[in-house]
Amino acid sequence: MSAAVRPIGIFAATIGLAVATFLVVDARTDDVSGRTPGTAALVVVAIGIVVLVLTQRASALPRTESDIAAMFEALALRPIRPGELDDAGRDLGARSMRSGRNMTLLVVVLMVPALALQKPLLIVLGAIPIVGYGLVLAANVLRPGGTLDEAWQAADRRVAPLGLRGAERPDVAFVPRVGGAGVESKLVGPTVLRGERHGREVTVTIAGGRTETHVDAAVAPVRLKGHRQRVRVDGDGDGASFAVDALVARIPASARWTGMRLEAGQGGITVRRPGISEAWLFDLWLAERLAEG
């Protein structure tokens, strides 16, 4: 709990001290430096940012949510080692955190004094190493075997216990920046996970802000949907068998079901939902329960 409170406390203290500094300096009548009252407040904010950045640790990286971790365990084809889900990308996350910390410190150390002194030349000179470091980071992300490739490898390790692997991944494209000058990077194309589970081909496609999970199993036609945190038969229910009704009745309520839609038939079982979170694990679990009859 202390690790969660500490950044909030540092942030609140920084804002409070900055406001107090601004008010104190603004109230002075003997200051003939010509600088605005915000200069001193800017220095206080810079000090607060430095303290906040330096106190962050890799332990602050987010961990797998408990229900997602439980679903990984339920679907795993082999035992999952303690910490395996989070360890897959923890080193990459820690290095990304260090890069962000270094960039923040560069901005604070080089730009804040230049802004405080109100020297345009210092601002220009300070921007050079900042831009240079940004270019180095970008090159490390995009180069073969770089950060982006490592991220996909970490994703493969994360889903490996499920018998899945990355089959396709989006390309990096540079497009004109919306509402501004220059260009920005954008991922174009789907992310596809594929593998064989219990003798059935499984494909998970993540694209366009939606996720589709397909299990290659011929079953009787039925449609299900997630409504108010429950799985329900979609439509009048005439096409649902007693086995499907019994399955639906046994599924506990969960916010993860909201927005889910399942269609099944001779062509297989397909589950779609909005969003690109790992809630597709629930869709895979449901589809495989349906395939088992």
Image (cartoon, grey):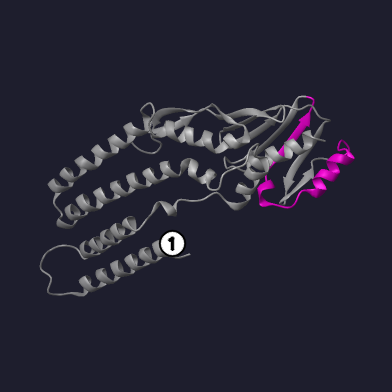
- Is 263 in the magenta? yes
Quadrant that contains the C terminus: top right
Q: Residue at x 77, y 48 (%)?
A: 251
Is 129 situated above or below 13?
above
Tag 1's secondary structure? helix
* Label 1 sits on residue: 3
Q: Does residue 266 appear to the left or right of 285 in the view shown?
A: right
Q: Is residue 182 visible?
A: no
Neighbour class for label 1 at 10 Å: few (<14), some, many (≥20)? few
Q: Which residues are magenta?
A: 238-266
Q: On the image, which quarter does residue 93 sit in?
A: top left
Is 14 situated above or below 169?
below
Give x and y (percent) for residue 13: 34, 68
Q: Nearer the viewer, residue 29 or 233?
A: 233
Give x and y (percent) for residue 272: 67, 36
Give x and y (percent) for residue 83: 53, 47
Q: Residue at x 33, y 34 (%)?
A: 138
Q: Nearer the viewer, residue 71 or 125?
A: 71
Q: Does residue 30 appear to the left or right of 208 in the view shown?
A: left
